[in-house]
Amino acid sequence: MSMKKYVYFFDEGKGDMKSILGGKGAGLAEMTRIGLSVPKGFTITTEVCVE
């Protein structure tokens, strides 16, 4: 059984995941990925926000 992922830590996402993480979540993930100083955090998926 495959479980859906609803929470992504900033270091798990990428900038091209806007459809999943939303614009701000994808932006924070990308800033983390390239090494900018971003506080630790997470984003819930857009699917959760719709449901």
Image (cartoon, rainbow, N blue to C red):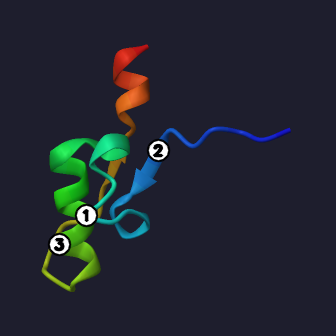
Where residue 24 sits in the image (x, y, percent)? Answer: 15, 48
At x 63%, y 38%, the residue is: 4
Question: In 3D space, how far apart are the residues under numbered discs 2 and 1 (Cα atoms)?
Answer: 16 Å
The residue that label 1 is drawn on is 15
How many numbered marks appear? 3
48 left or right, relative to 34: right
Pointer 2 with pointer 1, Cβ within 8 A: no
The residue that label 2 is drawn on is 7
Question: In 3D space, how far apart are the residues under numbered discs 1 and 3 (Cα atoms)?
Answer: 8 Å
Mark 1 vs mark 3: in front: 1
Give the position of the C terminus as an image quadrant: top left
Under mark 1, the amino acid is: Gly
Q: Residues within 10 Å of mark 1 (few under 14, many from 20)?
A: some
SS of the residue under disc 2: strand
At x 34%, y 22%, the residue is: 49
Q: Residues within 10 Å of mark 3 (few under 14, many from 20)?
A: some
SS of the residue under disc 3: helix
Where residue 39 sits in the image (x, y, percent)? Answer: 20, 66
- Extreme-top residue of the structure: 51
At x 24%, y 41%, the residue is: 22
Under mark 3, the amino acid is: Met
At x 86%, y 38%, the residue is: 1
The image shows residue 4, relative to residue 36, as above or below, that is above
Q: Residues within 10 Å of mark 2 (few under 14, many from 20)?
A: some
The circle drawn on residue 31 is 3
Q: Earlier in the sequence, mark 2 or mark 1?
A: 2
Where residue 23 sits in the image (x, y, percent)? Answer: 17, 46
